[in-house]
Image: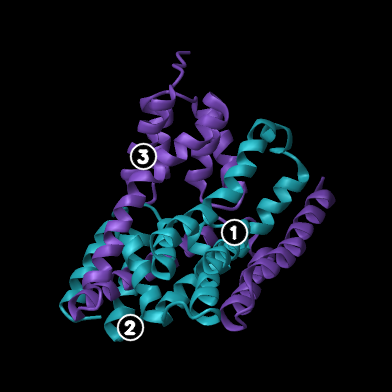
Chain colours: A purple, B cyan
Amino acid sequence: MSHPLPSLGDLFRGFARIGLSGFGGVLPFARRTVVEERRWLTPKEFNGLLGLCQFLPGPNVVNLSVCVGARFHGAAGAVVAPLGLIGAPFVLILLLALAYDQWGHLPLVQDMLRGVAAAGVGLLFSMAIKMAKNLHEPRVYLPFSAIIVVAILILRLPLPPVMLSLLAVSASLAAWRAARRG
Amino acid sequence: MAQLVDLFVQFFWIACVSFGGVAAILPELHRVVVEQRQWMDDATFSQLFAIAQAAPGPNLLVMSLIGWQVAGFAGAVVATLAIVLPMAVVVFFVYRYWQRFEHALWRNAIQLGVAPLAVGLVVSSGCLIGLSAGFGRGGVVMALVSMVVMLRTRLHPLWMIGLGALVGALGGV
């Protein structure tokens, strides 16, 4: 199985391409680049690392770039890969921020952005529905979704304590159910 | 300077509980940035969200925009670092041992426990942006159309973003 070792430059360029290849959802491009095009990882290795990155909080694709980079070049890789990933998009977004500073007050711009926000709201709800459909034992766990909506959206409680306390309960429930089954 | 430190610390903790990605932490960002510290208003917050949606690159860049709005270039850098750094450091130290706990009971339990919470947070995000953006009836329709299209078709989200911009420009939102 050919397993060409990427250099730091390869890592940077590879992740730079990934970073610019999508609008929000760059993960499929990450898979295509890392596994299929450059063959830095086998599908199994990729899925393994992705599992960790999805398990941890934080942006999945950034975490992924860190561990792919670390795997090949330790700390240096862990810095270079994410830099490649978000470097150019970061510069682009700052240019857009400048444009917004300049023209953001214009009614046309405000109207267009509101339209984009509307589309974005739809995207968020569709994302939530897809996630809900993938839930394991929804009858057991959906109540937690309802509780966190109340806590965060209605009561406007701070997220860190809410997340940690609810997670303690939901994860304990999951562990208890698994132990009971096994 | 104190504001930059504050920005970093606030966003750092948010990053530590950002299960579900940036889509899940929008309500908390709003609570801190708009409600608590009043660094910007509702409309601006939803507009920054829109810009980040439309721009190439990962969605986490909405943090950079918020940071920019609060404290210019330094704010953008600090905000981006805050969202990226905590878990990047954890991943760096932990990825080698992943296989050891990948199938552990506790890790599966956490994963199962996180999932419904992430769902609730993304729903909250949708509601929050919807409330902040000041939609008319057209905006609600656009959001519904976008949602249904994303659920029923395989169209790239960018089509909906473009449609939203167009409908908005025509005054329909």
Q: What residue type is labelled 3?
A: Ile
Q: Distance between the residues labelled 1 and 3?
A: 25 Å
The circle drawn on residue A18 is 3
| Spot occupied by residue B58 in the image (x, y as percentages of width and height) | 40, 51
Q: What residue type is labelled 2?
A: Phe
Q: Is residue A2 toward the left or the right of residue B2 in the image?
A: left
The circle drawn on residue B152 is none
Characterize the local packing of mark 2: few (<14), some (14-19) or many (20 or more) Cα atoms within 10 angstroms.
Answer: many
Q: Name the residue nearer the viewer: A173 or B88.
A: B88
Characterize the local packing of mark 1: few (<14), some (14-19) or many (20 or more) Cα atoms within 10 angstroms.
Answer: many
Q: Which amino acid does label 1 sit on?
A: Phe
Tag 1 residue: B12
| The quarter of the displayed image where residue B71 is located | bottom left
Q: Which residue lies at the image location 53% right of the left edge and 55% below the top edge?
A: B83
Asked whether the viewer can see residue B157, the reply is: no
Q: Distance between the residues labelled 2 and 1?
A: 31 Å
In what element is the residue under mark 2? loop
In what element is the residue under mark 1? helix
